[in-house]
């Protein structure tokens, strides 16, 4: 779907992409990085809208430097920022975008109706966009990216500004773009956790460099951890320390939690246990029961990207880039 080779983009003060080489295959791929990591810059180069300073890239086998308009015919793009005209309705806007992509008038109207229904906009589609909620606007942006039946869509932060339910709905829609229509998706986010659930493959960039590109299952196996909190008892006045020792004896790695991905403060009462497989959950339960402690919570932890990479010495970062903290997802 997408291949880049030593792709760089330099602005006068910033190197937005730094010799990025990555291959993206059909399916749903997540492009993760903190704000400023270079995600939007990469998308603009892939669409042929912005020239690279160095290196090469091809989308659907087409060269981004010379075949930009052919790429844009076969690719849909959902930009990150609000870019919708407030005075027209979703139907008018999406029909216009379909016509811009070359569809004849009747096909443009039909495809618009189908696509808006697919993204979950019904009667509202005849009202001016200016009165829409953020979630509805994101759906219009998604519809215009899909209306010309592209082979690939590039979605720049589609969950931005959405509440948790809106995020889940949007992630479900994105997944269905691939499962229902066979369209491949490249979706960016600064939240690794939400892409884990949606994507087959995840590419992580930081400071314009490739940190890692791997299938989601490899990723989550390598990064899963379990947050465990227990009560203290008379027998074990420091239940957390007792559990940590017991887990250690059971051959599991447990460490006190640092500040959480959700902004939760560091806690002496919370242990993070590396998940090595299904048996880890049983081993934790047995250790707690064996000590007679009460279990307050046991939950799968979402990681900040920084957490993963600060403890990841075998990433794809050939430059020895030690600034894992720079990918601290907000
Ligand atoms: N036109 C430009 N001129 C100068 N610098 C730019 C330009 N566009 C982007 N940059 C810089 O390049 C870097 C990468 O920006 P980019 O927008 O690609 O990041 P991003 O990963 O998409 O982050 P965000 O999610 O915040 O958009 C940033 O430091 C940004 O300030």
Image (cartoon, rainbow, N blue to C red):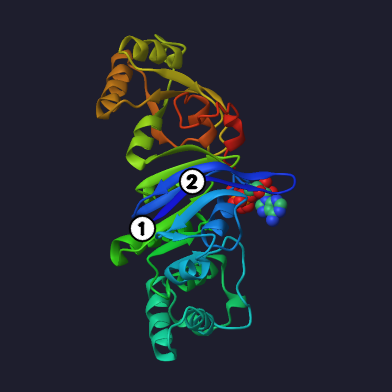
Tag 2, which secondary structure? strand
Q: Quick one: 266 or 153, which is closer to the camera?
A: 153
Q: Position of residue 16 (x, y in %)?
A: 63, 46
What label sits on residue 175 in the rendered view? 1
At a point 55% along the width and 41% down the height, the residue shown is: 19
Q: Is residue 296 visible?
A: yes
From the image, tell me which residue sits under label 2. Answer: 5
Q: Residues within 10 Å of mark 1 (few under 14, many from 20)?
A: many
Tag 1, which secondary structure? helix
Q: Which residue is the extreme one toward the bottom?
A: 106
Q: Position of residue 121 (x, y in %)?
A: 44, 75
Q: Quick one: 157 or 149, which is closer to the camera?
A: 149
Residue 51's place in the image compared with 74, above or below, is above
What label sits on residue 134 in the rendered view? none
Q: Position of residue 91 (x, y in %)?
A: 49, 83
Q: Nearer the viewer, mark 1 or mark 2?
A: 2
């Amino acid at each position: 779907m997408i291949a880049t080779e030593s792709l760089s983009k330099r602005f006068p003060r910033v190197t937005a992409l730094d010799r990025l080489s990555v291959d993206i295959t059909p399916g749903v791929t997540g492009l993760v990085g903190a704000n400023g990591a270079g995600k939007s810059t990469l998308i603009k180069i892939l669409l042929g809208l912005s020239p690279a300073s160095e290196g090469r890239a091809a989308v659907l086998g087409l060269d981004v430097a010379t075949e930009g308009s052919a790429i844009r015919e076969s690719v849909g793009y959902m930009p990150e920022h609000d870019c919708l005209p407030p005075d027209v309705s979703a139907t008018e806007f999406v029909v216009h975008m379909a016509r811009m992509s070359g569809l004849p008038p009747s096909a443009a109207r039909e495809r618009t109706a189908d696509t808006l229904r697919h993204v979950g906009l019904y009667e509202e589609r005849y009202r001016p966009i200016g009165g829409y909620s953020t979630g509805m606007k994101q759906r219009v942006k998604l519809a215009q990216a899909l209306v010309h039946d592209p082979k690939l869509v590039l979605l720049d932060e589609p969950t931005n500004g959405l509440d948790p339910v809106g995020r889940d709905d949007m992630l479900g829609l994105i997944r269905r773009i691939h499962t229902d229509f066979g369209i491949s998706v490249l979706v960016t986010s600064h939240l690794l956790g939400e892409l884990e659930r949606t994507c087959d493959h995840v590419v992580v960039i930081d400071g314009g460099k490739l940190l890692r590109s791997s299938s989601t299952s490899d990723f989550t196996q390598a990064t899963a951890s379990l947050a465990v909190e227990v009560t203290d008892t008379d027998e074990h006045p420091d239940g957390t320390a007792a559990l940590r020792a017991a887990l250690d004896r059971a051959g599991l790695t447990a460490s006190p939690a640092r500040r959480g991905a959700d902004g939760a403060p560091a806690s002496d009462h919370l242990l993070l246990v590396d998940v090595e497989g299904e048996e880890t959950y049983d081993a934790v339960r047995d250790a707690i029961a064996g000590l007679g402690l009460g279990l307050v919570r046991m939950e799968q932890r979402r990681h900040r990207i920084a957490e993963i990479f600060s403890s990841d010495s075998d990433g794809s970062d050939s430059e020895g880039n030690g600034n894992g903290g720079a990918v601290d997802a907000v």
